[in-house]
């Protein structure tokens, strides 16, 4: 149901954009109004990604408030649930994979910044191995 709703919203938005471009060629020779450039995302994919990111954000906030879990854990669980191994709602796109990898690097960096060396000494080698 969610996938159909997202697809319908994307098709409606593409129709609006297509109808507003007119029939001029904008510098290309095949008349599709794109000016010879290809976007990395279609409007539907971009809309779906924005909606999915918003849902992940909200699930993170709700998991922190009602389940006493860290927001990050709720966001990861929402991503798993909507990803290809769950409901398969999230599009698998190369640019989205790049965004995910950058997000992972930032998450690890943030976790490293928050580590207190005094706590690391208390936990010892066992904590470092994790």
Image (cartoon, rainbow, N blue to C red):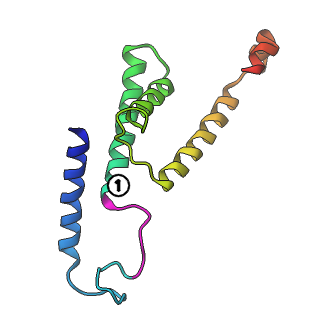
Query: At 30% from the left edge and 80% from the top edge, which residue is drawn?
Result: 33
* Quarter-of-image position of residue 101: top right
- The residue segment tinted magenta is 36-43
Compared with residue 77, is residue 82 higher up or lower down, i.e. above or below? below
All told, the count of numbered labels is 1
In this view, the residue farthest toward the top is 122
Mark 1 is surrounded, within 10 Å at the Cα level, by few (under 14), some (14 to 19) or many (20 or more) other residues, namely: some
Q: Main SS of the magenta segment?
A: loop
* Quadrant assignment for the N terminus: top left
Compared with residue 73, is residue 101 higher up or lower down, i.e. above or below? below
Q: Is residue 42 left or right of residue 99?
A: left
* Quarter-of-image position of residue 45: bottom left
Most foreground residue, 68 or 48:
48
Q: Is residue 54 magenta?
A: no
Q: Percent position (x, y) of residue 91? A: 39, 48
Q: Is residue 58 left or right of residue 23?
A: right
* Quadrant assignment for the C terminus: top right
* Quarter-of-image position of residue 90: top left
Most foreground residue, 74 or 8:
8
Q: Is residue 38 magenta?
A: yes
Q: Percent position (x, y) of residue 35? A: 37, 82
Query: At 77% from the left edge and 20% from the top edge, which residue is drawn?
Result: 128
Q: Percent position (x, y) of residue 96? A: 48, 50
Compared with residue 43, is residue 5 higher up or lower down, i.e. above or below? above
Q: Is residue 56 left or right of residue 123?
A: left
Query: At 26% from the left edge and 43% from the top edge, which residue is drawn?
Result: 3
Q: Percent position (x, y) of residue 65? A: 39, 17
Disc 1 secondary structure class = helix
Residue that mark 1 sits on: 45
């Amino acid at each position: 149901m969610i996938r159909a709703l997202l697809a319908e919203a994307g098709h409606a938005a593409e129709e609006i954009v297509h109808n507003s471009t007119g029939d001029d060629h904008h510098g290309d020779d095949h008349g599709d109004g794109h000016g010879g450039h290809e976007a990395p995302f279609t409007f539907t994919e971009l809309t779906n990604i924005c909606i999915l990111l918003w849902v992940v954000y909200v699930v993170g906030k709700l998991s922190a408030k009602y389940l006493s879990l860290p927001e990050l854990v709720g966001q990861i669980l929402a991503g798993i649930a909507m990803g290809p191994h769950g409901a398969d709602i999230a599009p698998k796109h190369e640019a989205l994979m790049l965004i995910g990898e950058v997000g992972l690097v930032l998450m690890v960096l943030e976790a490293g910044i928050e580590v207190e060396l005094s706590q690391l000494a208390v936990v010892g080698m066992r904590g470092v191995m994790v």
